[in-house]
Image (spheres, rainbow, N blue to C red):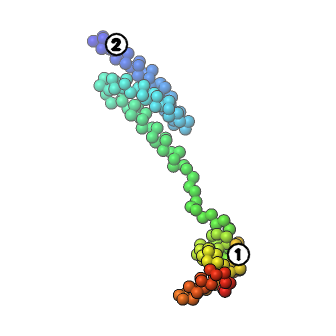
Amino acid sequence: MSVDKAFREMIRNEIEVQLKPLRAVISRLEAGTSDLDALRDVAERLAPVAQAMAPLFGAPAAKPIKRGPGRPAKAAAQPVSTGGKRRGRKPASDGSRECAIIGCGSPSRTKGYCAAHYQKLRMLTKTNRRPSAWVDYAPPNSVEDIRLPRGRAAAKALAQAAQGGSST
Ligand SMILES: [Zn+2]
């Protein structure tokens, strides 16, 4: 009888001692100055005691322990959600300029040309047919588009260009 009482007293004191730092940590957590490592440490130290307590005092003794591991996850999730959203990739290195080709109207992407016309410029350059007006960083709507020959004429133009001819 008295042994049992003394034992309970001892356990109660032990809990009180162990709970003190946990309470302090929890209050610090609630104040916003999270000290997760300290909380984890206390929870780990408390775990075996709590397991021994549970049958003696029932559910209430186990409650603080469950709280320990639960809190850090919640607190750790918060900083992640506060990450600022970055705008997608819309560099527009030339500001809001339009394509250099007259009447195109698409925003310029590279060297003053829109994506499509820059591809055309590259192709013309590669096949040695780049018009002199198609300069890099030409002002918006300043360069006349050219119509590329098709079919047999295209083959002829390419052949001429390959020979160094300067027709169109
Ligand atoms: Zn264009």
How many C-alpha atoms fall within 10 Å of the one at disc 2: few (<14), some, or many (≥20)? Answer: few
Judge left or right: residue 10 versus residue 40.
left
User: Can you name the residue that lies furthest to the top here?
Assistant: 2
- List x then y, in percent, for residue 125: 64, 75
| In the foreground, 156 or 12 | 156
- List x then y, in percent, for residue 154: 57, 85
Residue located at (45% from left, 40% from top): 73
Q: Which residue is mark 2?
A: 6
Q: How many marks?
A: 2
Above or below — where is 35 with respect to 109?
A: above
User: Which tag, 2 or 1, sits closer to the chain's start?
Assistant: 2
Residue located at (36% from left, 30% from top): 62
| In the foreground, 55 or 80 | 80
User: Can you name the residue that lies furthest to the left here?
Assistant: 1
Looking at the rendered structure, the kind of residue marked 1 is Val
Could you tell me which secondary element the residue under label 1 belongs to?
loop
Marks 2/1: CA–CA distance: 95 Å
Judge left or right: residue 55 versus residue 36.
left
- Quadrant of the image occupied by residue 117: bottom right
The C terminus appears in which quarter of the rendering? bottom right
Residue located at (53% from left, 87% from top): 151
Of marks 2 and 1, the one in the foreground: 1
Q: Is residue 121 visible?
A: no
Could you tell me which secondary element the residue under label 2 belongs to?
helix
Looking at the rendered structure, the kind of residue marked 2 is Ala
Q: Which residue is mark 1?
A: 135
Residue located at (56% from left, 55% from top): 85
